[in-house]
DNA sequence: GACCTGCTGCGGAGTG
């Protein structure tokens, strides 16, 4: 390669590389080189990394002294990424760029899998630029000379900021940034983000409360790629089930699409769904063996790396994956993207669509494969959302005391801190701008003595106050703290491996502890037989031809976003008036007519309540179309408010469209609603707290909080601590703290998190306010309707095994399928 | 005219 002649401007370098110099890159470079901070907003694959990395290099070149020996050493640039794999990938690209500029810039990577040797070498001398995860950055703050490490730092970049910001990992990053700004007030802070609804807020969170937001910039990449949404519609609507979320009935249509393209990504919503699809395709189309692969978070890293690599080399025709391929490693775009089932949010759908489309400027195309009939409405709603360029917000986390407690201990393990100064610094972080002295004092007490109800236990006295400085002196405390840093708390997972030693991935403890020798299950696309469980490893062997249980993971439950929900309500309301406007809705007509016949289709100004009686009891179905979390909260409140009128208990069930209250007693909703305002927002929080569920929910949330705050030690690496034990000790702590303390911030936080995340309080208030303006219509039906049936099935599914469920559904069909 | 659920991400250091 010809040596480059210096390239002291970005233009020169671009010319040398023969690259096109995009407007947004130019803008970002100019802003950075003029000393500003800001946020770059650009889609994946647009060269957003270089828009900052190159100007950083230019700045570095310009700062070099004439005599090489006089060169300033030590850390100058930090580049934070949410993924280990991403930092390795960036490392290669950046090193290459530095090389081509003929620069002797030392670049380092620091993450959990950085070798001990490399860590030691970094400790002796830091590289000039460091790629790091938020967690590893915190670990640097736990070192004795941390302010020394960061004193020459002039630039910090947070990559994929949209991804971090909405989580506690984002809060963790905010605290680091506040610290770095206090070490060096002239620090330049830059974020790189995909498009989200609240970009302005994203910049504020990044720059902090004292940051000079007015003087910073948001740089937007202009090229809005066109996205084409195409639904896979079966010939007859009957071929789509009323309920269900697997979508495998359309497997033939999907395979036809896959066959047409070179490479296809098939996104599903759950890990077991990828396993099911893989099995079904292999069974029906054996020719896919060897050119199809699976990708989800429970598969072994090596396996996933191989899949990504093979996708790169176009050795694979089809990869079935979950959100594990949403982020990160920038592989070459694939030809076709298919989304199976609701993506739940428009932003996620757009991001996945962006994985397709080869030529610059060419549109991206995404196929939507509905898994049940009603999802045809979602197809239309998604298309509309994409066309109108609607994007969801990522609200930042506020007042996370668990993360702050951990941070205080981290600093105490490191250089120690002076509390007044740290208080000011912490208030610079967006997430703690409202923290007051009382809360701060409570936290100081918590890290030094444990909370008031724990003062008798030495275990919780972690930090000491020595000559005005808060410090950790115990090596044991320091060691344990280092092991439990970070904000990600997951269930105990066991590794799965073959007898000859090849690792397949991991399953959750709850799934595998029910297994005995000889049991068969499906995992990593294979049918395997359980052999034994030892330490934290499950040994299996191949079980050809046998049928087995599917691995189930206890994962998160994404609700439908409120933006998408709004479109769905609108589309549904329009579907009767304009049945032929969209082909999806035209296909759905028979079902919609049946809904109208048996009950009604609510328009946007109406709330539908259906009441029906079956052998199971009296059902009340309510359809706010607000996503399952809001429905969970509403069902709790309604059940509580109804039980205040007369003693009555309900079992509840819900999906993204509505919820069900089932009881053995009849409630006349029409009469009840004349007497009480069931949907009132008055005393909303009180009513939630009055219900038993709120305490149970808070107790479950507390497990995560107590782990982050360092109340519960999760065990040494490789040592097996059962989730059950952790749950038990956290619920004991929760009980003690709730009982003996009025003002325990961590307990309060648990309730607050239930309100904010579990029940989506803000959204629920908005929904209730909307309902108050709506006309409520109660329909008595004598048969389940297309809207209510799926909710009934969802409830049964939780109670019954799958064979029994099948029987039950058959019975229901017989029972209700007589002519109207 | 009616089947299968539940995403992602991270992580010591000092001593012999």
Image (cartoon, coloured by chain):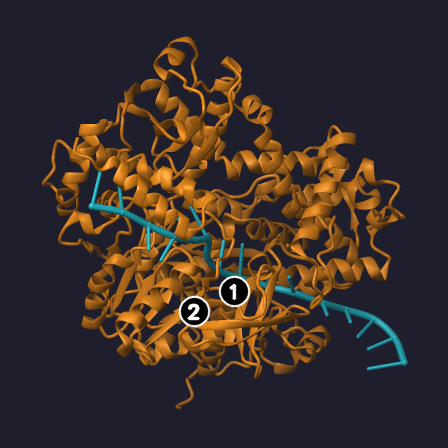
Chain colours: A orange, B cyan
| Residue A779: quadrant of the picture | top left
Between A145 and A619, the residue placed more toward the observer is: A619
Q: Dot 2: what SS? A: loop
Between A271 and A420, the residue placed more toward the observer is: A271
User: Farthest residue toward the bottom?
Assistant: A1
Q: Quadrant of the C terminus of chain A?
A: top left
Horizontal arrangement in the rendering, residue A199 relative to residue A397 (left or right): left
Horizontal arrangement in the rendering, residue A728 relative to residue A613 (left or right): right
Precedes in sequence: disc 1 or disc 2: 1
Residue named by callout 2: A329
Crowding around mark 1 (Cα neighbors within 10 Å: few <14, some 14 to 19, many 20+) is some
* Res A215 visible: no
Crowding around mark 2 (Cα neighbors within 10 Å: few <14, some 14 to 19, many 20+) is some
* Res A685 visible: yes
Horizontal arrangement in the rendering, residue A428 relative to residue A655 (left or right): right
Residue A1 on image: x %, y %: 40, 91
Residue A678 on image: x %, y %: 43, 18
User: Farthest residue toward the top?
Assistant: A675
Residue A562 on image: x %, y %: 37, 38
Residues tagged 1 and 2 counted as in contact (Cβ below 8 A): yes
| Real-space CA distance between mark 1 and mark 2, rounded to the nearest whole angstrom | 9 Å
The chain identifier of the residue carrying mark 2 reads A
Q: Dot 1: what SS? A: loop
Residue A158 on image: x %, y %: 51, 58
| Residue A697: quadrant of the picture | top right
Between A5 and A218, the residue placed more toward the observer is: A218
Q: Is residue A697 above or below residue A650?
A: below
Residue named by callout 1: A83
User: Farthest residue toward the left?
Assistant: A580
């Amino acid at each position: 390669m010809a040596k480059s002649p210096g390239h002291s401007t970005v233009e020169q370098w671009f010319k040398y590389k023969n690259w096109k110099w995009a407007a947004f890159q130019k803008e970002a470079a100019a802003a950075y080189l003029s000393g500003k901070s800001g946020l770059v907003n650009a889609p994946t694959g647009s060269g957003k990394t270089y828009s900052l990395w190159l100007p950083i290099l230019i700045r570095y070149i310009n700062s070099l002294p004439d005599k090489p020996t006089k060169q300033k050493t030590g850390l100058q640039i930090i580049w934070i990424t949410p993924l280990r794999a991403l930092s390795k990938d960036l490392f290669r690209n950046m090193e290459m760029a530095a090389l081509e500029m003929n620069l002797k810039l030392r670049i380092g990577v620091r993450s959990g899998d950085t070798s001990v040797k490399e860590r030691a070498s970094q400790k002796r001398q830091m590289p000039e630029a460091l790629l790091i995860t938020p967690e590893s950055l915190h670990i640097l703050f736990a070192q004795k000379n941390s302010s020394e490490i960061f004193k020459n730092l002039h630039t910090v970049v947070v990559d994929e900021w949209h991804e971090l910001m909405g989580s506690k990992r984002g809060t963790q990053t905010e605290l680091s940034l506040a610290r770095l700004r206090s070490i060096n007030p002239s620090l330049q802070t830059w974020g790189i983000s995909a498009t989200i609804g609240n970009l302005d807020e994203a910049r504020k969170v990044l720059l902090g409360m004292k940051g000079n937001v007015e003087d910073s910039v948001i740089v937007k990449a202009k090229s809005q790629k066109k996205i084409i949404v195409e639904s896979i519609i079966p010939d007859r609507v009957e071929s789509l089930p009323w309920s269900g979320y697997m979508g495998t009935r359309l497997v033939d249509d999907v395979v036809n699409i896959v066959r047409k393209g070179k490479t296809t990504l098939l996104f599903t919503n759950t890990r077991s769904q990828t396993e099911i699809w893989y099995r079904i395709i292999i069974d029906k189309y054996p020719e896919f063996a060897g050119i199809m692969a699976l990708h989800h978070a429970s598969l072994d890293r090596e396996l996933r790396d191989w899949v990504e690599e093979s996708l790169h080399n176009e050795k694979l025709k089809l990869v079935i994956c979950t959100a594990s391929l949403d982020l990160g490693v920038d592989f070459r775009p694939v030809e076709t993207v298919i989304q199976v089932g609701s993506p739940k949010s428009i932003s996620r759908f757009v991001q996945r669509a962006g994985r397709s489309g080869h030529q610059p400027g060419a549109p991206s195309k995404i196929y939507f494969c509905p898994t049940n009939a009603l999802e045809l409405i979602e197809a239309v709603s998604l298309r509309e959302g994409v066309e109108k360029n609607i994007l969801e917000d990522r609200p930042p986390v506020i007042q996370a005391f668990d993360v702050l407690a951990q941070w205080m201990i981290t600093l105490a393990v490191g250089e120690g801190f002076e509390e007044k100064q740290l208080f000011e610094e912490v208030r610079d972080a967006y997430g703690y701008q409202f923290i007051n002295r009382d809360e701060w004092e409570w936290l100081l007490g918590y890290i030094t003595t444990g909370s008031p109800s724990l003062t008798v236990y030495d275990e919780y006295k972690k930090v000491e106050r020595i000559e005005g400085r808060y410090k950790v002196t115990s090596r044991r405390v320091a060691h344990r703290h280092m092991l439990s840093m970070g904000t990600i708390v997951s269930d105990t997972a066991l590794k799965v491996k073959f007898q000859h030693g090849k690792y397949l991935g991991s399953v959750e403890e709850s799934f595998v502890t029910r297994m005995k020798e000889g049991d068969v299950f499906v995992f990593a696309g294979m049918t395997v037989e359980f052999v034994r469980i030892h330490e934290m490893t499950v040994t299996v062997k191949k079980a050809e031809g046998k049928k087995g249980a599917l691995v189930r993971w206890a994962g998160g439950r994404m609700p439908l976003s409120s933006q998408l929900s709004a479109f769905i309500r609108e589309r549904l309301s329009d579907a009767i008036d304009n049945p032929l406007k969209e082909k999806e809705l035209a296909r759905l007509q028979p079902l919609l007519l049946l809904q109208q016949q048996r009950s009604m289709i609510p328009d946007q100004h109406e709330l539908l309540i259906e009441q029906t009686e079956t052998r199971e009891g009296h059902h009340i179905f309510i359809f706010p179309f607000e996503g399952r979390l809001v429905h969970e909260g509403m069902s709790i409140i309604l059940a509580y408010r109804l039980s205040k009128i007369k003693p009555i208990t309900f079992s509840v069930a819900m999906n993204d469209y509505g919820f069900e209250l089932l009881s053995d007693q009849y409630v006349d909703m029409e009469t009840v609603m004349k007497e009480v305002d069931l949907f009132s927002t008055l005393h909303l929080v009180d009513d939630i707290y009055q219900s038993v569920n709120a305490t149970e929910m808070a107790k479950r949330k507390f497990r995560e909080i107590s782990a982050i705050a360092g109340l519960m030690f999760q065990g040494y690496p490789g040592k097996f601590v059962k989730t059950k034990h952790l749950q038990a000790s956290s619920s004991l702590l929760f009980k003690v703290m709730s009982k003996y303390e009025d003002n325990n911030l961590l307990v309060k936080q648990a309730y607050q998190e239930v309100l904010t995340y579990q029940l989506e309080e803000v959204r629920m208030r908005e929904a209730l306010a909307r309902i108050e303006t709506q006309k409520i219509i109660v329909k008595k039906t004598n048969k389940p309707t297309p809207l209510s049936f799926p909710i009934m099935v969802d409830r049964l599914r939780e109670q019954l095994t799958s064979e029994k469920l099948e029987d039950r559904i058959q019975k229901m069909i017989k029972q209700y399928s007589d002519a109207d």
